[in-house]
Structures are given as C-alpha cells and as structure tokens.
Image (cartoon, rainbow, N blue to C red):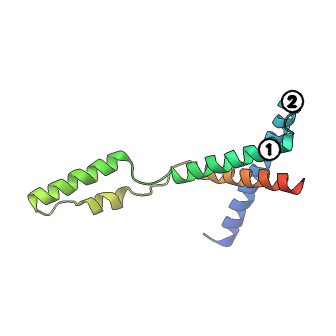
C-alpha cells in the first residue's frame, strides 16, 4: 500500500469515528438531559471506555484458530502418529487456517478511534 491509500483510510476512519462521537454525544444529551446524577461528558467517557473494550474484542476475535481447525489439526496429528506416512500434519492444517481476516476489522478500528476520541473530549473539557 502506498502512503496516499494509508492516509485516505486513516482520514475515512477518523471521519466516521467523529460522526459516531457526535451522534453518541447528541443521544446522551437527549436521553440524559433529565437526569442530574451524571453529565453528558461523564457518560461519554464511560461509553468511550466501553467502545475501546468492544473494539479490542472485535479486533482480537476476528482471526485465529476456530474449533473446527483445532479439531482438524488434532485428527491430522493422530493420523500422522498412527500411520507414519506422508499425510498432512497439524502444522500444515494450522498454517492454512490461521488468521484469516473477517469483516469486523474495520468496525473494530472505528470503535477504537471513537472511544479514544470520546475520552480525549472528556479530558479536554475538564
């Protein structure tokens, strides 16, 4: 990827994150205007922490070895130990199935950027 594509992606993610920030802040003002216990900025900071945690969970949970791949690797390891022949071993099965990208990576990045922006807005307005 060249630098223009990277900067364009960062700009798009930042723009969408800014839209999420504004939408969440307006919803907080609308729903929480009658409650006096918490201000909209305090709830924004708590929602920012939750969005960062949710974004990290989406980011970590989008790749890796699922149970089907793990059981296939175990079966191939058993077959390789029993037959001692030239068959696909567990390393080949796991190499084929590890870290396949799924569609939640962009959502996770947007949630992470939004959470960081929410916490940044909270600390800038103290």
Furthest-bottom residue in this view: 3
Do the CB atoms of the residues marked 2 and 1 lie less than 8 Å apart? no
Badge 1 crowding class, 10 Å Cα cut-off, few under 14, some 14 to 19, many 20 or more, is many
Please tell me how many numbered marks the rendered image carries.
Answer: 2
Percent position of residue 125, x then y: 90, 53
Furthest-top residue in this view: 34
Is 52 or 62 nearer to us in this picture? 52
Q: Secondary structure beneath disc 1? A: helix
Q: Secondary structure beneath disc 2? A: loop
Is 85 displayed left or right of 29 in the figure? left
Is 75 displayed left or right of 26 in the figure? left
Q: Residue at x 86, y 31 (%)?
A: 30
Quarter of the rendering containing residue 4: bottom right
Res. 44 mark: 1
Circle 2 sits on which residue?
35
Percent position of residue 39, x then y: 87, 39
Percent position of residue 51, x then y: 68, 46
* Mark-to-mark CA distance, 2 and 1: 14 Å
Is 79 or 10 nearer to us in this picture? 79
Q: Quadrant of the N terminus?
A: bottom right
Q: Earlier in the sequence, mark 2 or mark 1?
A: 2
Is 44 or 102 nearer to us in this picture? 44
Percent position of residue 35, x then y: 86, 30
Q: Residue at x 21, y 50 (%)?
A: 75
Vertical relation: 125 (above or below) 1 = above
Q: Nearer the viewer, mark 2 or mark 1?
A: 2
Is 45 or 84 nearer to us in this picture? 45
Quarter of the rendering containing residue 29: top right
Quarter of the rendering containing residue 109: bottom right
Badge 2 crowding class, 10 Å Cα cut-off, few under 14, some 14 to 19, many 20 or more, is few
């Amino acid at each position: 990827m060249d630098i223009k594509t990277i900067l364009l992606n960062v700009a798009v993610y930042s723009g969408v994150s800014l839209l999420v920030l504004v939408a969440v802040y307006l919803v907080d003002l609308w729903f929480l205007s009658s409650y006096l216990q918490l201000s909209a900025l305090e709830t924004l900071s708590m929602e920012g922490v939750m969005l960062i945690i949710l974004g990290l969970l989406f980011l970590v949970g989008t790749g890796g070895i699922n149970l089907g791949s793990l059981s296939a690797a175990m079966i191939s390891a058993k077959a390789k130990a029993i037959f001692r022949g030239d068959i696909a071993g567990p390393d080949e099965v796991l190499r084929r199935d590890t870290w396949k990208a799924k569609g939640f990576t962009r959502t996770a990045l947007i949630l992470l950027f939004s959470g960081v922006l929410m916490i940044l807005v909270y600390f800038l307005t103290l």
